[in-house]
Image: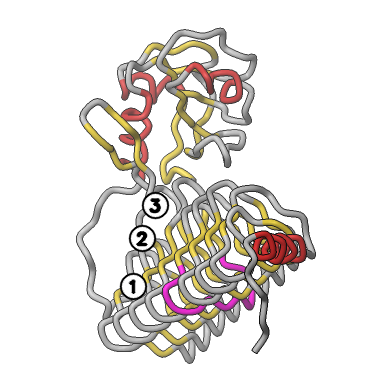
Amino acid sequence: MHLPQPTTAAELADQLGTKLIGDGHLRITGANEIHHVQPGDLCFVDHPKYYAPTLASAASVILIDKVQECPPGKALLIHPEPFQAYNSVIRGARPQVQYESSEAPASVGEGTIIGPGVHLGKGVVIGRDCLLEPNCVIGEGCVLGDRVTVSAGAVVGGEAFYYKRTVGGLTAWRSGGSVRLEDDVFLGPCCTIARGVSSTTVIGRGSKLDAQVQIGHDCRIGAHVQMAAQVGVAGNCVIGDWSILQGQAGIAQNVTLGERTVIMAQSGVGRNLPPGKSWFGSPVQEARKAFRDLVALRRLGGERLTTE
C-alpha cells in the first residue's frame, strides 16, 4: 500500500522508539509484505528463517527483531515486536472509520444502478453502467470499472484472513490493500473478495464468478476467467487468463495457474500448474491420468464399470 504521508527511516524510528541502522534519510512511501515489496517500501521480519530473503528483497526499510548487518542502500529498525510495530503503521495509514451513509458515495459513474441496502465505503470509485444489487458491500477504497455487476449480498473489500500467531493468541494483520474489479466483471450472489494485505486484489476484465465464490487477499485473477459456485482461492494466487474453475474447486495459497487452465469440480490444487491443461482430483493430476488411475483402481477392486 502507499502511505498517505511519506516519512523517512529516521522519523519512523523516532515515532516507534526503535534503534536505526543504516541510512536514516531513506524515504518510506509504502508498506508491503514480502511477496509484493518494492523500493520505497517498509516491511517486517521476525523469524531467522526469513532474515536473508527479507534483507535481500526490494524493501528499503525493514523492521526486524534482531540486529543484523544492514545491506547497502537500506535501513533497519530494530524492534522487539516488528509485527506489532508494522501493524501500528498500517493502522495509522488506514484507521478504522465510522460507516458513512450509502447515500453519499465517493464517485459513481453515469448509468450505474445502486440497489437498496448497498453500502459504499469511503473513497470507493465506481465506473459507468454498473449494477450493484441489494445489500452488497463495496469496502473502503475499492475500484470498479465499467459495466461491473455485483450481485446481492456480495462483499468486495472485506479484511484479509491473515493473522499472526502470538503468545496471547491470533492477532489480525490490518489490511492496507484494496480491490479492483476491471471492466465487465460479474460477481454472483454472496461472493466475497478480500482486500489485499498490502497490495490490490484484482479480478481481471470480463471474468465471471458464480455464487458464493471466495477470493483471498492479494490474488491476481486474469481476464475472462470463469469460476463456478463455491470455488475457493486462497491468498496471493495468480490465475491465468481464460481459465475455468469448476464448482467447489479449491486453490491453496501462493499458487499460480497458467493461462487456459481447467480445474475440474471438487479438485484441490496445492502447486503451480502449467498453462493449457485440464486437471482433476485432490491433489490434482492431469485429468486424463487421473481418470485412468480411477479406472485401474476400480478394476483392482473387481468393480465393473458401467455407463448410463
Graded by Cα atoms within 10 Å as few (under 14), some (14 to 19) or many (20 or more), the crowding at tag 2 reads many
> Is 148 displayed left or right of 73 in the figure?
left
Asked if the stretch drawn in magenta spans residue 212, the answer is: yes
Spatial separation of the CA atoms under disc 3 and disc 1: 15 Å
| Magenta part, dominant SS | loop
* Residue 82 percent location from the top left of the image: 37, 24
For disc 1, the marked residue is: 137
Ranked by sequence position, the earlier of labels 1 and 2 is: 1
Asked if the stretch drawn in magenta spans residue 247, the answer is: no
**Label 2's element?**
strand
Graded by Cα atoms within 10 Å as few (under 14), some (14 to 19) or many (20 or more), the crowding at tag 1 reads many
Q: Which residues are magenta?
A: 203-213
Query: As shown in the figure, which amino acid type bears the numbered disc 2?
Result: Gly
The residue lying at 77 percent from left, 65 percent from top is 288
- Work out which residue is located at the far right of the displayed protein and give it: 276
Disc marking residue 158: 2
**Label 1's element?**
strand
- Do labels 1 and 2 touch, CB within 8 Å? yes
- Do labels 3 and 2 touch, CB within 8 Å? yes
